Image: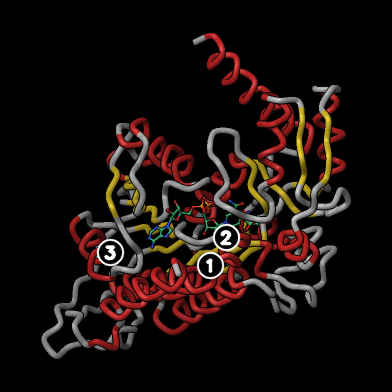
Amino acid sequence: MPVVRTLSKVAKQALLSTPGCGCQPLTVAVRNISFSPRQVTSDASFHSVSFSETDHPKVLITGGLGQLGVGLAKLLRKRFGNNNVILSDIRKPPSHVFHSGPFIYSDILDYKNLREIVVNNRITWLVHYSALLSAVGEANVPLARAVNITGLHNILDIAAEHGLRLFVPSTIGAFGPTSPRNPTPDLCVQRPRTIYGVSKVHAELMGEYYHHRYGLDFRCLRYPGIISADSQPGGGTTDYAVQIFHDAVKTGKFECNLKPDTRLPMMYIDDCLRATLEVMEAPADTLSMRTYNINAMSFTPEELVQEVQKQLPDLEVTYDVDTVRQAIADSWPMNFDDSNARNDWGWKHDYDLPELVQTMLNFIGSETRIARAN
Ligand SMILES: NC(=O)c1ccc[n+]([C@@H]2O[C@H](COP(=O)([O-])OP(=O)(O)OC[C@H]3O[C@@H](n4cnc5c(N)ncnc54)[C@H](O)[C@@H]3O)[C@@H](O)[C@H]2O)c1
Ligand SMILES: C[C@@H](O)[C@H](N)C(=O)O
């Protein structure tokens, strides 16, 4: 029943915000746009965002309270100034996030709310992080479809109409069992078997279509599984690679939900966020494509355990395989070919497996020592 209730709520919101209702006052903004992606009214005003290279961008991050958004806001605020980066989400921010810089409520299914935020804050860059990840997406397909697909349509239209530079992350999950898996190149068969993957292929194709059709400055990186110490993953297949560090430090025991030999591409969060900033700042003429694989390392649970046990030899590991996650992982890339990102805009990762493990254990270890002392 909760699924049905959520679906009808989502459907109502979606209906209220779809272009088909004809209730949007519409604008066209972008260079090279012959007409707006949403129908243009006869008295539409034509704004163009003047954003000179010397100005700092004014950034909005959607879905900013998940694993990646707070860290990205911190990085972008350091570069562009605190007030130039607005975090948004539909959840209530913890106090330290609320007090660290601008935060605003934004539901990406509410088109008018999004447009108001973009207009009132003179947003020039939009980083679209809202999504349901692979495992939670399979648990609630209607909601994943609404957030990841309908929500994306709102984002694309807002970005095109207001001349924004738009970043949408994709994922290793945008590939499937018929893709080459070791390594997976940028351009190959993409037939994912999750709603998450399907929605991300859709996002890649729609973003590229809007780029060619309307001149939208769309930029997209396919992230591997991201590993972070101070933020929790939101329900994906790669979550085990974060959880192991917390359990190893706190209890000395870890139960892994993937088989020991499941190889997946992974990356430390600092590399992921830096890549995001770098591709957003890359001169357009260096981008031969609009969607790039990025990678850092690739490992199995067994290899990760061995590396953690070099620091914590008493760590005990058992395996209790989650069949949904295992099936997803078995259809994803084992290694990611990111040579185009490296050649085009100079992508280079800093963290390999040993540095990742050391950094995670240092961070979680010191946090745990502080918590125990208080
Ligand atoms: N974390 C990873 O390993 C990883 C890997 C590849 C790609 N990505 C992509 O990066 C992005 C960010 O990932 P994350 O790990 O921070 O995700 P997350 O699941 O931790 O956070 C997603 C956020 O979206 C918000 N959200 C859900 N519905 C919303 C709505 N209707 N309106 C606004 N916000 C809504 C949630 O409240 C949540 O805070 C996602 O698009 C994800 O697909 C992440
Ligand atoms: C890989 C990525 O997209 C996410 N961490 C997931 O597992 O769903």
Q: CA distance from mark 2 to mark 3?
A: 24 Å
Mark 3 lies on residue: 114
Counting residues from the start of the chain, the first of labels 3 and 1 encountered is 3
Residue at position x 29%, y 68% from top? Answer: 110
Side (left or right) of 302 relative to 370 = right
Residue 358: x and y in percent read: 73, 27
Is the CB of the residue bearing disc 1 within 8 angstroms of ligand 1? Answer: no
* Type of amino acid at the residue the image marks with label 2: Val
Residue at position x 33%, y 32% from top? Answer: 95
Residue 234: x and y in percent read: 55, 50
* Type of amino acid at the residue the image marks with label 3: Leu
Q: Residue furthest top?
A: 373
Q: Residue furthest left?
A: 43
Mark 1 lies on residue: 140
Q: CA distance from mark 3 to mark 1?
A: 24 Å
Q: Quadrant of the N terminus?
A: bottom left
Side (left or right) of 72 relative to 47 = right
Residue 250: x and y in percent read: 67, 24
Side (left or right) of 277 relative to 23 = right
Is the CB of the residue bearing disc 2 within 8 angstroms of ligand 1? Answer: yes
Tell me whether circle 2 and circle 1 mark residues in contact (CB < 8 Å): yes
* Type of amino acid at the residue the image marks with label 1: Asn
Mark 2 lies on residue: 136
Q: Is residue 220 above or below residue 356?
A: below
Residue at position x 55%, y 73% from top? Answer: 199
Of residues 193 and 26, which is closer to you in this image?
Answer: 193
Q: How are the residues colored? A: secondary structure
Q: SS class of the residue under badge 2?
A: helix
Which labelled disc corresponds to residue 40? none
Q: SS class of the residue under badge 3?
A: helix
